[in-house]
């Protein structure tokens, strides 16, 4: 490849186009001239960047542009290769690599043809059950008996014996959390939660005038002793906890902590809002807190993280019929109802096994991406779980989270700084990186390499970090 790289360097010098476009143009020229053959391996990104005198991210964008044109393919752990069949796009097609969104915590999208066909069939069959116009009418909030039974069946492995009479089908888990907090707390009331947690809670609390109290946590999640101390001094009106693959830290409460938290809540009569969107992803599942304190726990789970956020279907399990009626009224006031067509689709996919197949595929893809992250980010400290599709990345001193996020943004990668999740100041020096969404595994590989390169070359900040380390919120 030595001669090719010299030719590419000359082509870059002569081109008036952005460097990454010029790299793709040079690849296209060599393919068309026969200098590059189908399945021929291209130089590694770091070698390419060194030979051309450009930075790593520009080299990565060049290969990404070539892949977008259909010229090359990336193979995680192996490199980039000329495609066997190249599309006949013009060499100088105007195309820019858009920003890489690693900020939205969406599951990866499996491309298995059989699974995609099942999903398409589900959409195609919408409305074939009963009266089509029934899907266009107002519905009683919470879903039909059949829809609630489907929800109970889906949650049965985590929450055995859940009574369909105490399950409400909601327009997403966020709507369920809003309704719960509106029903259980009043303006000025205290909500206990982890010091770093799901940012939606921060927004809901601000909207309702609720005061969140961020409790200490570590790699195993919420500190049960801190919760017990708060209850002994000033019992909160409720506890919010995200026990599995915490968003953003990925911490998962071990069984003994779940039991201790349940015991304290029962002792002081503190309701628990258990938000468990990732609960069915781990291969080794832990019993929800709702199984330990069912008379006080409101369990929330949905389909956003195990299939896709566009469904907007969540399930809320309440302690008893009285709470079910009360929350149904509150949620109907706030959101009227969940989309009847999406409820029907979710029920069908639960009953025919499509949801189970999709969840297995998402779990498998998440595992593959975590293994990929472990290889690419080798030597860089971060926190995650084998089946999660996000990472919690502490920023190495003396640099800070704002600098890292800004540097990544300069390379077109959107990440989320810890301030969005922090319930108290100062926010820890960390960012959340998401591995899912529409990005392919090959895209994910390139993005992680850019992140690795950005961290390795962070410039020193005169003032140093401004927040706290991961284990000391």
Image: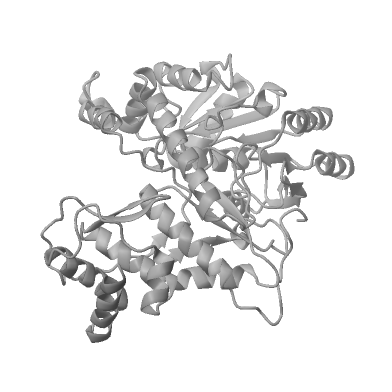
Q: Hey, which quadrant is residue 138 in on the image?
A: top left
Q: Nearer the viewer, residue 334 or 444?
A: 444
Find the residue positioned furthest to the top: 161
Left or right: where does residue 153 sit relative to residue 288? left
Q: Say which of 381 and 209 sits in front.
A: 381
Asked if residue 62 lies left or right of residue 183, the reply is: left
> Who's the residue at 43% across and 54% down the image?
445
The front one of 365 and 470 is 365
Kindly tell me whether residue 70 is visible in this rendering.
Answer: yes
Q: Is residue 90 above or below residue 174?
A: below
Residue at the (84%, 40%) spot, across then down: 225
Could you tell me residue 314's position as x and y percent? Answer: 47, 33
Residue at image location 59% in from the left, 71% down from the top:
402
Quarter assignment of residue 34: bottom left
Q: Which residue is at the front of the view, 200 or 351?
A: 351
Q: Quadrant of residue 428?
A: bottom right
Residue 170 image offset from top left, x and y in percent: 46, 33
In this rendering, is residue 108 above or below 343? Answer: below
In the rendering, at what x and y percent does residue 97 appear?
A: 31, 66
Measured along the vertical axis of the image, is residue 2 above or below residue 328? Answer: below
Quadrant housing the N terminus:
bottom left
Q: Position of residue 244 (x, y in %)?
A: 62, 37
Can the viewer see residue 439 in this picture? no
For the point 79% across and 42% down, the residue is 223
In the rendered view of the protein, which quadrant contains the C terminus? bottom right
């Amino acid at each position: 490849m030595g001669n090719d790289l010299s030719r590419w360097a000359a082509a870059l010098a002569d081109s008036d186009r952005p460097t990454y476009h010029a790299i793709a143009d040079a690849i296209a020229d060599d393919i068309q001239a026969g200098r590059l053959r189908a399945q021929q391996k291209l130089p590694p990104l770091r070698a390419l960047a060194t030979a051309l005198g450009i930075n790593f991210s520009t080299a990565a964008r060049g290969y990404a542009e070539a892949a977008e044109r259909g010229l090359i393919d990336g193979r995680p752990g192996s490199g980039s290769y000329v495609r066997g069949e190249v599309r006949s796009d013009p060499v100088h097609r105007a195309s820019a690599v858009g920003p890489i969104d690693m900020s939205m915590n969406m599951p990866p999208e499996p491309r298995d043809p059989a699974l995609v066909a099942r999903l398409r069939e589900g959409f195609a069959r919408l409305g074939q059950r009963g009266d089509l116009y029934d899907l266009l009418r107002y519905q009683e909030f919470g879903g039909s008996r059949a829809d609630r039974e489907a929800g109970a069946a889906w949650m049965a492995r985590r929450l055995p014996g859940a009574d369909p009479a105490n399950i409400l089908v909601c327009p997403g888990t966020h709507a369920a959390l809003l309704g719960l907090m509106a029903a259980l707390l009043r303006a000025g009331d205290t909500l206990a939660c982890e010091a770093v947690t799901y940012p939606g809670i921060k927004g809901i609390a601000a909207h309702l005038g609720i005061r969140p109290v961020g409790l200490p946590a570590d790699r195993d999640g919420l500190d049960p002793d801190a919760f017990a101390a708060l209850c002994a001094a000033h019992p909160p009106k409720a506890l919010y906890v995200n026990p599995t693959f915490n968003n953003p830290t990925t911490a998962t409460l071990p069984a003994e902590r779940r039991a201790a938290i349940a015991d304290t809540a029962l002792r002081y009569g503190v309701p628990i809002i258990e938000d468990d969107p990732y609960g069915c992803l781990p291969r080794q599942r832990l019993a929800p807190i709702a199984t330990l304190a069912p008379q006080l726990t409101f369990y929330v789970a949905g389909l956003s993280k195990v299939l896709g956020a566009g469904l907007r279907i969540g399930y809320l399990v309440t302690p008893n019929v009285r709470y079910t009626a009360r929350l149904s009224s509150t949620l109907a006031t706030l959101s009227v109802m969940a989309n009847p067509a999406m409820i029907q689709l979710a029920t069908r996919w639960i009953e025919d096994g499509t949801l189970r197949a999709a969840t297995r595929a998402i779990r498998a893809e998440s595992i593959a991406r975590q293994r990929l992250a472990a290889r690419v980010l080798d030597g860089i400290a971060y926190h995650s779980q084998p089946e999660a599709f996000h990472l919690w990345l502490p920023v190495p001193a003396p640099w800070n989270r704002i600098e890292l996020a800004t540097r990544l943004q300069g390379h077109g990668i959107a990440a989320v700084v810890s301030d969005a999740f922090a319930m108290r100041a100062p926010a820890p020096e960390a960012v959340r990186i998401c591995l899912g969404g529409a990005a392919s595994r090959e895209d994910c590989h390139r993005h992680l390499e850019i992140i690795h390169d950005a961290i390795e070359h962070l410039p020193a900040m005169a003032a140093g970090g401004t927040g706290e380390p991961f284990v000391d919120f």
